[in-house]
Image (cartoon, coloured by chain):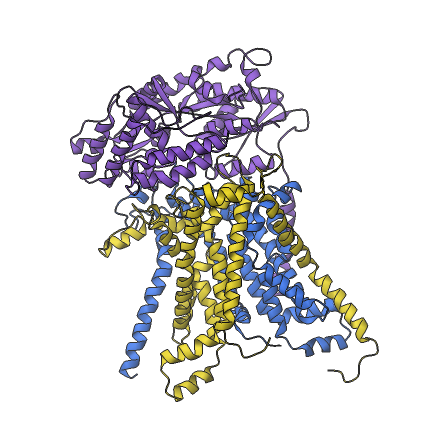
Amino acid sequence: MPPRKTVRTASWYTVALLISSVMVLPILWMLTIALKGHAAVFQVPPRLLPDEFHFENFIDGPKAIHFPRLLLNSLVITGLSVVGGVMTSMMAGYALARLRFPGRRLWFYVFVGSMMLPPVVGIIPLFQLFKDIGWYDTWLPLIVPAWLGGNPLFIFLARQYFLSVPYSIDEAAKVDGAGHVRIFFSVMLPITRPAWITMAILAFQLSWNDYLNPLIYLYSSEKWPLSVGMASFVSQFAGQTPDWNLYMAANLLYMLPPLAVFFVAQRYFIQGLSALGTVNQR
Amino acid sequence: MKRTLHAAGALLVAGGLLATSACGGSSGKEAGGKTTVTVMTWESNATNQLIDKALAGFSDPGITVKRIDTPNGNYGDKLASLTQAKKLPDLFWCGNDTELQYTGQGLLTDWSEKLSGSGSGSADFTTGSFVPTAMKNWKTADGKIGGVPSLMNTYGIWYNIDAFKAAGISVPAAGWTWDEMYAAADKLHKKGAKYGLVADAMTGLDAPFSLSLYSLSAGGAPFADSVNQPTKVTADATYTEGVGKLVAGIKSGAVAPPGYDISNQQSLFAAGQIPMLWSGQWLAAGFLTDKPKIKYGFAPLPQVGKAATLYDAVGICTPSYTQNADATFKVLKYLDSTVWTKVLPDSPVAVPAYTAAQDAYFDALGKAGLTTVASTVKADLDAPLTMGVRFTTQWASQSNDLITAYWPDILQGKKPLSDLQTMTDKINDVIKSNG
Amino acid sequence: MTATPDPRLRPRDKLTSDTRAAYAFMAPALIGFTVFVVYPLIRSAYFALTRYNGLTAPVFVGLGNFRRMFTTDPSFWPSVRATLLLVVLYVPLSLAIGLALAVFCNRRMRGVRVLRTLVYLPVVLPVVATITLWKFVFNPQVGLANQVLTWLHLPTSEWLSGEGSAMPSIVIVMLWSVGSTMIIFLAALQAVPTELYEAARIDGAGPRTMFFRITLPLISPIMVLQVVLQLVTALQTFNQPKILSPDGLGGPGFSTRVLMLSIYNNGFPTLGRVADFGYASAQVWVLFLVIVVVIAATARFSSVWTYSDHVS
């Protein structure tokens, strides 16, 4: 390789290494803390490698916050939210993109406009509403909004992706005598796979990470998802210092499911996001 | 792909069933005529287990006691939610301010009748069975009381004996002065500690009250004439002098400034990083389980003339919609009188407000060798001058915002000491506008 | 494409059946819109004019809440300042760094996929997990941040405990998740046809010219979208200040008490203080109006900035 190109390649790799370490170092450090003993966490100056390896933290930490129960809660809440969110958004997007009916432009703008409504406006009225209908301390306030097209961004994504599918496919299916439902499930969904997989990943992350809503609606600790359970581990009360080593061990386990989901679905994710990036087709 | 979809579908249906089961759930009457009384605490895991064991000794054929598990982080958020949902447990740990505010809004059961000893109450669990200041401060202006004091928090200075010896200063003891404290902090800081004294009570939201101790002890006026029904706040000459000394301490780096993160202060003290820590006697229980490496002691707060201390009693409250008030009162009595005697020996968190139960606490301290803690707590209970620890009124958040707006800046020298008067004027406006 | 219309489906019938199907498909979203958009808007506007603690009936106070907010409340203007500081620090930096990383990762180098994954990694991790991790990293006594600074012989900082450094620390935590911005920019960059670059290179253009004259204009629609999304999200930041501030209230002082946190503190106060839903709702509306103004302004100016090759 010509010398100038070598220098350029080398400098690229150096910068890449620097960036990687910035992104990864805090997680490695978390691993170190997770392996330390209780007193060693507060040694000054902090040691990078622990003196003794306390692997039992990985058992004690999760146990202290009833990890398995919280994990199950998170999985159920997130699973149901994802299915509902993706399904209803795809349905709405299909209607807006594929069906000719009066007012489809208007409704599209209305849905996109509601994207601009900050969730903060809804906190207090919705809290009162859910309280009045008796859904307080249940998972329903966390799941039902997803089933009612709760995230207009997904509707936007769905419609954009649907627009890029040629109409000839619809026509062909209609000639075969298919009704809208058949077209939707058997024809459109398979074609738009990158779109709804992307939505599923985004919905998964949104729900798995949601902290404010479970904090407001759930007070029974056995109903908490992991996000609230983990945060309550480190709030200080009555002068008690949190057990950082146990916490970091539990934290590492908490991070595994979203990581797994991401690695499995990476390819579709990039493809699906490109729907946001491309110029509109008509 | 199809098989995974089927599996996922099955899982989701199972999840859906779980979700429906997670809806609902309540306390109250069980089948068979037994009443369940629910209890919620903010204690640590260790203490909670001791409480459970002690509660097992409660024998009453018609009553089952159930403790609701609460991870003690976010207790405040949880309490707010439960209040909104009108699902507060029958007995829940509450601060003095919560009790007064809630009683004022009619949210709590009024125990004043039962506590008078006549009729449905019991003779050994009346207003007279408690420490007088505690009981007085728990009653509202019209004599109602929505909860019962349980434990009294006393405040003092935890000190690291080893650090004091290394710096060549004598350890704090009852009767020591503010000047001595600041001088010690300075020497300890110069000897290498990041801060000689960490005192969030003097830099945080409760700070104006803590500094009242200086003016009270010097014969001046306290910050607020009452914490429960204040009519005005003042910062007189002795008060300003006390604040000035604190400002100097922070400026020299001997005292931790406002904003210092106290979430780890207990562990840092135990690891020897903080030579003097202004905190409460409850740390003693924690120190018994994680034994610190250092030799430590607990001294009363410093004084100018007479001994002055902060008063702060926490307690147990009951919502107005409790299912069975009599049953609840029985469990309440058991909790406040008997349970503590069983819990404190292993976990001496605080001194009970119920005088008959106090010996259990002091004996436990004596057995653990925490003589300085016992003598300081006793001294605090006997202190002639006391001051509440914070406002307990409905508008407290507004005055807290004013404190946040002025106090840290004054302490760090960004605003002059004279701004103390501006702050008190504005707080007086808030008091006036809230009747 | 059929040449003759199918006698079974006359145009008018087709329209009605399409319309019915459309509303059937959109039904859940429509219900959601009414319940979760229209209802909160109206109800919170009502609450904003009352004093309401959630337990007893609301008391109408007219504009009293707004008067208190703008004149006597000592925490409102500092909240506004904290929110603006966060937005001004976070949004430009996240866009710039996101774009820079996207350009950097838009190469065919070996290992670039690993790099992309690593950069995106913090986004995948649960927010609460990473925020609490950073809280410990920034601990002035035992945290990694000060340790690294000491190794490099640089002065240490108070991070989240210092009034001047608290908000920048929070912004750093938020910037660690810049991977999500990067991914979107990356997708946009890859949609730019490479022939344009080839043609430019033949004409003798350097990398700087290519970036400013080709890349930026072609990704400008995405850029505008990103600006709006980032601004709106930044204005509603809640998790970070709530978990990272030492007292959970936006300390030290008011330095991290952004509007969302202030709203939460008034609506759901801790330790059994009585809630003030009315005042919180008034604050919600102020924030909402700010967001609307921001979006409108961006939309206004976006036609100036964006390049589009189609008429929509």
Q: Nearer the viewer, residue C71 or C187?
A: C71
Where residue A126 appears, as percent x and y from the top left, is 61, 47
Q: Colour of chain C?
A: yellow
Which of the 4 quarters of the picture holds residue A25? bottom left
Q: Residue furthest left?
A: B168
Chain coloured blue in this rendering: A
Q: Is residue A140 left or right of residue C267?
A: right
Q: Is residue B367 visible?
A: no
Q: Quadrant of the C terminus of chain A?
A: bottom right
Residue at point 18% right, 39% down? B190
Chain coloured purple in this rendering: B
**What is the count of numbered marks?**
0
Q: Nearer the viewer, residue B394 or B14?
A: B394
Residue at point 48% right, 22% down? B138
Q: Is residue A239 above or below residue C169?
A: above
Q: Is residue B259 visible?
A: yes
Where residue A18 appears, as percent x and y from the top left, is 32, 65
Residue at point 31% right, 41% down? B415
Q: Residue furthest right?
A: C7
